[in-house]
Amino acid sequence: MRHSVAVALCLFLGACAETAPPCSRPESGPTAESAGCLIWNDRGALLVRDWSGGWALPGGSVVVGESALCAAEREAFEETGLSVTATELAIVLDNGFHLYWCDAAPDARPRVHRPLEVREAAWLNPDTLNPAAWRYPGQGEIIAGLIVATSQSTYEE
């Protein structure tokens, strides 16, 4: 029994030890206090749910000396297990959070990579979530607005 618990604990925490892939553009961009990724495809936006139950985009604190772009890629990997590439800055929020458009492989399957921090990672349409389901107030409307604006500009091209 003790052996089973030890193995389960190692497997549960083992993902935390996996290091993020190198930044796609290590020399690029400004720094910030925090950054994250908006990963959008035909399955929806990749969102993470923390243990309080709130949904959010993958993101977090920028390490000293790290660009916001590199932090966005690293945080997406740490929270979802997906290797992503940040393409362009989508928006800088009022709190200084740098949100990047990020790409993942079309068949990418998220997995909880930081089980003590993230309870679930899933592809969801932000419009389907109740405003109270978001970890940060107003985040759903911001994300939906960015997606609509990008869809319209893509359509116009």
Image: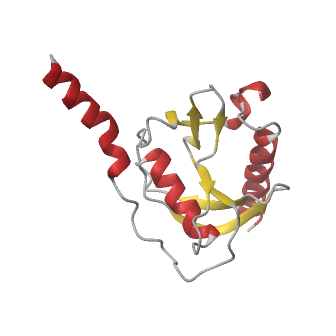
Number of numbered labels in the structure image: 0
Q: Could you tell me which residue is drawn at 73 percent across and 33 percent down?
A: 127
Tell me residue 41's x, y (percent): 57, 49
State left or right for residue 102 relative to residue 135: left
Horizontal side of residue 135 vs 71, given as left or right? right
Coloured how?
A: secondary structure
89 vs 152: above or below: below
In the image, what residue occupies the spot 36% across and 59% down? 19
Furthest toward the right, the residue is 94
State the quadrant of the N terminus. top left
Mark yes or no: residue 62 visible: yes
Q: Nearer the viewer, residue 14 or 135?
A: 14
Is 103 displayed left or right of 82 in the figure?
right
- The image shows residue 28 at horizontal and vertical percentages of 60, 80
Q: Quadrant of the C terminus?
A: bottom right
Instruction: Tell me if I can see residue 38 in this picture.
Output: no
What residue do we see at 67% from left, 59% from top?
34
Point out the residue furthest to the front here.
Answer: 2
Q: In the image as oriented, which residue stretches furthest toward the top?
A: 1
Residue drawn at the location 61% of the way across and 52% of the way down: 60
Residue 83 is situated, as x and y percent measured from the top left of the image, at 43, 58
> Would you say 140 lies left or right of 21 here?
right
Residue 84 in the image: above or below residue 129: below
The picture places residue 46, in percent across and down from the top left corner, at 56, 44
